[in-house]
Every structure is written in structure tokens, then in C-alpha cells.
Image: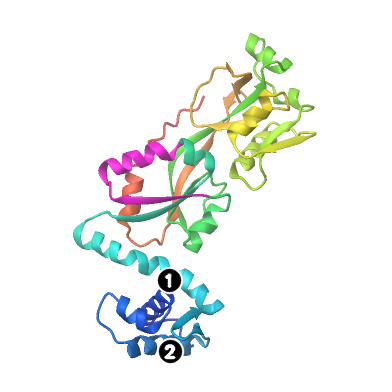
Amino acid sequence: MSGETIQLHRLEGFFWVARTGGYAKAARAFPYPITQPAVHNQVKKLEDELGVSLFERVAKDRMAPTPAGQLLYDFVRPFFEALPTVLRSVRDGEYGGELRVSSTSFLLRRLLPAWIRKLHGTHPDVMVHLEETAGDAVRLLRRGAVDLAIDHLYEVPDDIATMPVAQVRPRVVLPADHPEAKTILSGARPFEMVQMDSTPFVSYAPGQRARELQFMALAEGSVTPTSMLSGTSAEVITGFVEAGLGWSILPTIKSESEVIQEDGVVLAPLVRSGSETVFDIVAAWRKDTPANPLLDAMLEAAPQVKRNRA
């Protein structure tokens, strides 16, 4: 392959062949008139440039991508599928189309519903694809797998732009009959994490981002649980705690500072050195992202963050 550029119309021909499974079908599917030999010529020149075969014949009238072709198709497909909508948005000022957003299960349940309702109040045609992920948000953005990631970032790289959208506060969850729960309910003293050293800790399942925040909170308290259980959701974890199987730390977006007793558990703020622990949640996107009215609309509808810390 000479140089590093590929002509866009050759990628377009490749896309339609991969999508339809044949050259004749691709010619009929094109958004403008083109002949079957012209489509074949586009793909052949692209294969010559890349030095690999992109298709193999699997039936008389059926072409299938080779492994190299499938890799290229997975990369170009979102661009060509979204192109008509983006062009319409640019030309007519419309906002229809799909925005790909990734976040954790907790934030998808607690933060995104109100956010999406506000977005659809002003731009009802925007379709948001919400993806629960336990992966690295920055890596997903750099790969182009998502347009926007909503998460807690330990560090913000130079190529990533962010905007604060929420603050998550960890709350301790104890069995209501635990001695430490009775102590904090009586007001004798605030919760002391060190008192839970010998009690099993109930964490989120390995691989979940919320588990990382739990262990960050434990590290701040210099606590290393002697034994552990894990659950896949806050509801499961709360059920384990209520059954007396251990204690946990669960995230909340609410900022209540009081101790609460409900359904067999006691919830208390996690306080260190007189201040409540807070984790900032940001919306993150690549700085080199092309102009995207859907992303702009999503950010305009983002929640306003109150930064007062208890």
C-alpha cells in the first residue's frame, strides 16, 4: 500500500458489498446509480492498495468478508450507516440519529433516565444507544466504540475532554442488628470503618466499575476485609447485608447526610477526616471528535452539578 490514504469511494463500495453479500446487490443498494462492474472495480483497487483479500465466494451469488474484510467492515460500518443522518442534520439542522453512550449499570439506572427525558424534551428524534460496560471508558472512546462515556475517571488524558455531570457518594450498608449499626443509630459516634475489619465485605462482582470505587473507599479507610462475598447489583448486595452475611459500601447520587434505617439495614454516610467521601462523575469524549450535533444536544441536557461537599 502506497501512503496512508484510502479513497473514500472505494471504502463505500466495500461497505455495500459486505452489507449486501454480493456485487450486484451492492450496486442496487447504492444511494446513487452505479454499475456492478464499477463496484467490483472499487473493491479490487482497495484490495490491491491493502495487499489483502477482503472477500471470498461462499456461494454462486454470495460473497462473505474474509477475517481482514470483517475487521475493516466492523470499523467502517458505523460511519456509512450514520452518514445519511449526519448529512441531514448538517444540512437541515435536524437532530435525528443515534448517539452511542457507555456507562456503569448504577449510573444507567440512577442518572441517565432523567437526563434522557430532558434531552427528548428538546430533541425527540435523537436516539441514544445506552451500553452498560465494565471496560475502560478512555479505551472505548479512543477506539471509537462510543461517542460519550459517563464514568469516574482516575486521570483525564490530554486527548479527552470532560464535563462534570454528577457526584457519587458512597454510603455504608450494615445489618440493622450489627453492633456498629446500633452504635451509629444511637448517635454515640459516627461510623468507623475500622470496626468492620472482621466482618465479611459484600462487593460488586469482579470486573464491575462500581467494585473499583468500593475498594477505593476501603483503601481510604485502610481496611482490608478478611473475607468477601460478591453480588451483581445493589439490590443483591443489600439482600446479602440484610441477611446478616456481611456489610458493604454502595454508591448514591443523593446527598443525604443522616443515618437511615430501612428494610433490615442501616445506611450511613462514609465520612473521613470530618468530610464526606465524594467521587466526581464526568461525561467524557474525544477532543478530536468531528462536529456532532447529537453530542452537543446530549451535553446541553446534562445535569447541573452542585459542588458543595459535606
Identified at 46% across, 73% down, the residue is: 73
Q: Residue furthest front?
A: 60
Q: Secondary structure at mark 2?
A: helix
Question: Given contact means CB atoms under 8 Å apart, are the residues at marks 2 and 1 in contact?
Answer: no
The residue that label 2 is drawn on is 44
Compared to 159, does 103 lie above or below?
Answer: above
Q: Amino acid at mark 2?
A: Lys
Identified at 30% across, 43% down, the residue is: 120
Residue 234 part of the magenta-drawn span: no
Identified at 53% across, 86% down, the residue is: 52
Numbered range of the magenta stretch: 111-132
Identified at 48% across, 69% down, the residue is: 74
Q: With 168 as the anchor, is 36 left or right in this view? A: left
Considering only order in the chain, which callout, 1 or 2, is on the residue closer to the N terminus?
2
Q: Position of residue 276 (x, y in %)?
A: 57, 26
Residue 131 part of the magenta-drawn span: yes
The residue that label 1 is drawn on is 76
Q: Residue furthest left?
A: 92
Quadrant of res 278: top right
Q: Is residue 154 at all visible to an observer of this figure?
A: yes
Q: Secondary structure at mark 1?
A: helix
Compared to 8, does 130 lie above or below?
Answer: above
Quadrant of res 205: top right
Q: Amino acid at mark 1?
A: Val
Name the disc covering residue 238, or none.
none
Q: CA distance from mark 2 to mark 1?
A: 17 Å
Q: Is residue 9 at all visible to an observer of this figure?
A: no
Q: Nearer the viewer, residue 171 or 24?
A: 24
Q: Nearer the viewer, residue 59 or 190?
A: 59
